[in-house]
Image (cartoon, coloured by chain):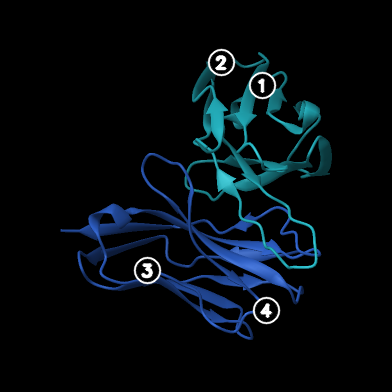
Chain colours: A blue, B cyan
Amino acid sequence: AQTVTQSQPEMSVQEAETVTLSCTYDTSESNYYLFWYKQPPSRQMILVIRQEAYKQQNATENRFSVNFQKAAKSFSLKISDSQLGDTAMYFCAFGANYGGSQGNLIFGKGTKLSVKP
Amino acid sequence: DTGVSQDPRHKITKRGQNVTFRCDPISEHNRLYWYRQTLGQGPEFLTYFQNEAQLEKSRLLSDRFSAERPKGSFSTLEIQRTEQGDSAMYLCASSLESYGQEFVPDTQYFGPGTRLTVL
């Protein structure tokens, strides 16, 4: 069975600084997807960034980038130039690739990020 | 397109009562998922539909839980004889499963959730 581990329950960062959130996962699948979702205090989950395991290039979305280390089964999220609006719970999630379909997602327990002015 | 919507947003009920939640996915999405999230935890998968067919159910989905997606559009999740342990946020998500020669990974888009409190 697949598992996702987020070892940092809480983190804080000063506005405009850079922060990295850690995620490791365990799977025997060779083809899968990885995601970072953000859940602000209003509690609607928002996709931040995704990575397909077959792609070697790390995904980037504006201030958000990932460091995907497939052999180490590590998938960290880097947030550059942190903004107050980045304050949220961040969840790492795994989706197996079944012929192009991800099926259900397996989530970590989350990291609560606080951006301080 | 207004995204995934869920109704009600909050539900308070007494132990033993039945409750039903509704999810309206993004209109062109053919997949619909239900997750449960308890305080301080990540969402846990309950079940999902491909169009109107329920393809997978988690062992978390006891006999008291039933989900439907008639006509492959909106979905309902019913909990019978609620227990205090059912108190949680129930999240719905939808995605577009694409078929064809080109590989198109789908992304799940989440609704705001229904918070259930069982007294």
Type of amino acid under label 2: Thr
Front-lying residue, B5 or A15: B5
Q: Are marks 2 and 1 in contact (CB under 8 Å)?
A: yes
Q: Which residue is mark 4?
A: A54
The alpha-carbon separation of the residues under discs 4 and 1 comes to: 43 Å
Q: Position of residue B89 (x, y in %)?
A: 54, 35
Type of amino acid under label 1: Thr
Q: Label 1: chain?
A: B
Q: Position of residue A36 (x, y in %)?
A: 50, 62
Q: Which residue is mark 1?
A: B82
Q: Which residue is mark 3?
A: A62
Q: Are marks 4 and 1 in contact (CB under 8 Å)?
A: no
Q: Label 4: chain?
A: A
Q: Label 3: chain?
A: A
Q: Position of residue B68 (x, y in %)?
A: 77, 28
- Mark nearest the camera among 4 and 1 is 4
- Mark nearest the camera among 2 and 3 is 3
Q: Label 2: chain?
A: B
The alpha-carbon separation of the residues under discs 3 and 4 comes to: 22 Å
The alpha-carbon separation of the residues under discs 2 and 3 comes to: 43 Å
Q: Earlier in the sequence, mark 3 or mark 4?
A: 4
In terms of secondary structure, where does tag 3 sit?
loop
Q: Earlier in the sequence, mark 2 or mark 1?
A: 2
Q: Which residue is mark 2?
A: B13
The alpha-carbon separation of the residues under discs 4 and 2 comes to: 46 Å
Callout 2 crowding tier (Cα within 10 Å): few <14, some 14–19, many ≥20:
some
Q: Quadrant of residue A87?
A: bottom left
Type of amino acid under label 3: Asn
